[in-house]
Image: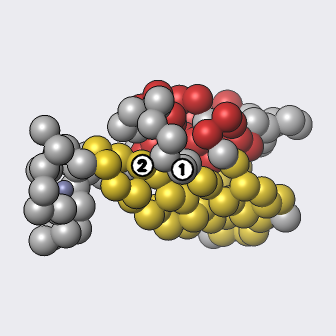
């Protein structure tokens, strides 16, 4: 099992994508990666707990979006096997086994994919005072 925590310096694409990369807001990502067998295939289970600053589309205020996800990524032996799996299941999110996989990039990808399309404070939680 592999685990770690990442800050903004390790996550350039995420920082570029979220609110204002210059704000001193906290970007924190904790991850845990472990190997399992899922439906007869080797797979990685990636669990992520993150806290990412986003700009609310309703009040334009910054807020911290908590993200919690668990994803199972089957690991193919090679591109041929991956292509076969994907033709069976076009929605499959799988990887090809690599000796030195870039775990940080994988974690960053999954966090980027899980960001809300329209970031907003929870209903009714926008601050009353607007700073614009
Ligand atoms: Zn808001």
Looking at marks 2 and 1 on the same chain, the residue that comes earlier in the sequence is marked by 1
Relative placement, left or right, of 54 versus 77 is left
Relative placement, left or right, of 34 versus 122 is right
Mark 2 to mark 1: distance in Å? 7 Å
Q: Which mark is residue 53?
A: 2
| Mark 2 crowd level (few <14, some 14–19, many ≥20, 10 Å Cα) | many
Give residue 113's position: percent from left, percent from top: 43, 45
Relative placement, left or right, of 132 versus 75 is left
Give residue 17's position: percent from left, percent from top: 42, 32
In the image, the residue with mark 2 has its CB under 8 Å from the nearest atom of ligand 1: no
Residue 66 in sight in this render: yes
Q: Which residue is mark 1?
A: 26
Q: What residue is drawn where x is 51% and y is 36%?
A: 14
Which quarter of the figure has residue 12?
top right
Q: What residue is drawn where x is 57% and y is 64%?
A: 49
Q: Quadrant of the N terminus?
A: bottom right
Relative placement, left or right, of 41 versus 116 is right
Say if mark 2 contacts mark 1, CB within 8 Å.
Answer: yes
Q: Secondary structure at mark 1?
A: loop
Q: Height in image: 65 above or below 57?
A: below
Q: Height in image: 122 above or below 60?
A: below
Which image quadrant shows ligand 1?
bottom left
Q: What residue is drawn where x is 46% and y is 31%?
A: 21
> 81 or 121: nearer the eye?
121
Q: What residue is drawn where x is 45% and y is 36%?
A: 23
Q: Secondary structure at mark 2?
A: strand
Q: Quadrant of the C terminus?
A: top left
Total of numbered circles in the picture?
A: 2
Give residue 43's position: percent from left, percent from top: 70, 59
Residue 92 in sight in this render: no
Which quarter of the figure has residue 125?
bottom left
């Amino acid at each position: 099992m592999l685990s770690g925590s990442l800050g903004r310096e390790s996550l350039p694409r995420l920082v570029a994508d979220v609110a204002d990369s210059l704000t001193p807001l906290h970007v924190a990502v904790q991850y845990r990666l472990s190997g399992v067998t899922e439906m007869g295939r080797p797979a990685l289970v990636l669990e992520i707990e993150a806290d990412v600053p986003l700009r609310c589309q309703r009040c334009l205020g910054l807020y911290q979006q908590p993200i919690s996800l668990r994803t199972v990524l089957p690991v193919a032996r090679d591109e041929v096997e991956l292509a076969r799996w994907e033709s069976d299941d076009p929605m499959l999110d799988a990887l090809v086994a690599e000796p030195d996989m870039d775990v940080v990039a994988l974690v960053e990808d999954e966090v980027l994919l899980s960001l809300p399309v329209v970031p907003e404070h929870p209903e009714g939680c926008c601050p009353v005072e607007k700073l614009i």
